[in-house]
Image: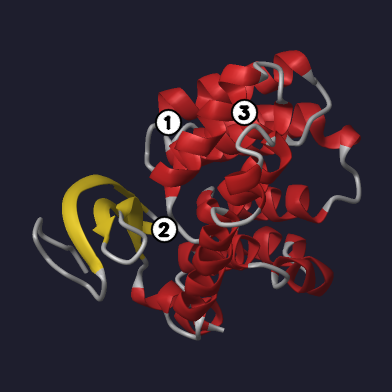
Amino acid sequence: MSLAAGTRPGPYEILAPLGAGGMGEVHRARDTRLRGDVAIKVLPQAIASGGAWERFEREARAASALNHGILKQQPSNNDARLWRAILHLLAGQNAVAQEDLRIILDREPLNVPARMFLGETMRMERDLPGAVQQQQQVLEQAPKNMSARNLALADMDGGELDKARGLLEEKRSMFPNNYMWRATWALLLALEGKRQEALQTMDNETLKFLGGSVLTTLGAAEFYAVLENTPKALE
């Protein structure tokens, strides 16, 4: 589903496209309720079904509530601002999340979580060079950080599967029992066309973990979409 400028899905007015990828299209839009610009993610049918939108909307309301709580009283509270940015990210409001993350990094350039999430929002908007730059900077600060996984995802999005494989193999020993790492490896195998290996890697325990939040659930949906298993993606 592609949205033209001026389209009004619900309380949003579409302003301009920001990017597109396997997880759908992203548009800059005006939220008439929150009275600010947001990023609207249009999900593929295989991902959008099953109540995912309602979960996105709940997280957006939670993020908006922070504006009238801690941050209104303590605008310099970076911890609260980071949580608000994460909630906006989960709700698909990447432009708003980026604004908060950049404010944090202006104050604390070495804030690893803020830079890692900034890179992830850039990846979602298909700014792959920017995403790679941010995640590489995180790895320079913290070589054992999980951002290596995010960097590999950016490489996959750019079609650089060999580069992603090399990075994941290099860092594998640091995360032997990490479900996020295992899910990323499974996605790489799927993209490489190694269906059976991918399915074996994406085991029940990993799937159970991925069902814990919207963002990780979408990762599982993307995995099955790559395998062209629409019923499982919908599940």
Q: Looking at the figure, which quarter contains the N terminus?
A: bottom left
Residue 178 lies, with reference to residue 197, above or below; the image says above
> Total marks drawn?
3
Pointers 3 and 2 in contact (C-beta within 8 Å): no
State the residue in front, 136 or 183.
136
Residue at 47 percent across and 72 percent down: it is 57
State the residue in front, 137 or 21.
137
Please provide percent x and percent y for residue 46: 41, 76
Residue 214 lies, with reference to residue 28, above or below; the image says below
Upstream in sequence: badge 3 or badge 2: 2
Which three-letter amino acid code belongs to the residue tagged 3? Answer: Arg
Q: CA distance from mark 3 to mark 2?
A: 22 Å
Q: Circle 1 — which element?
A: helix
Q: Residues within 10 Å of mark 2 (few under 14, many from 20)?
A: some
- Check disc 3 and report the residue beneath it: 115
Which three-letter amino acid code belongs to the residue tagged 1? Answer: Leu
Upstream in sequence: badge 1 or badge 2: 2
Q: Circle 3 — which element?
A: helix
Mark 3 or 2: in front is: 3
Q: Residues within 10 Å of mark 3 (few under 14, many from 20)?
A: many
State the residue in front, 200 or 207.
207
Upstream in sequence: badge 3 or badge 1: 3
Q: Does residue 161 show up? A: no
- Check disc 2 and report the residue beneath it: 23
The colour scheme of the drawn protein is secondary structure
Q: Looking at the figure, which quarter contains the C terminus?
A: bottom right
- Check disc 1 and report the residue beneath it: 128
Please provide percent x and percent y for residue 6: 8, 60
Name which quarter of the figure residue 41 lies in. bottom left
Residue 215 lies, with reference to residue 163, above or below; the image says below
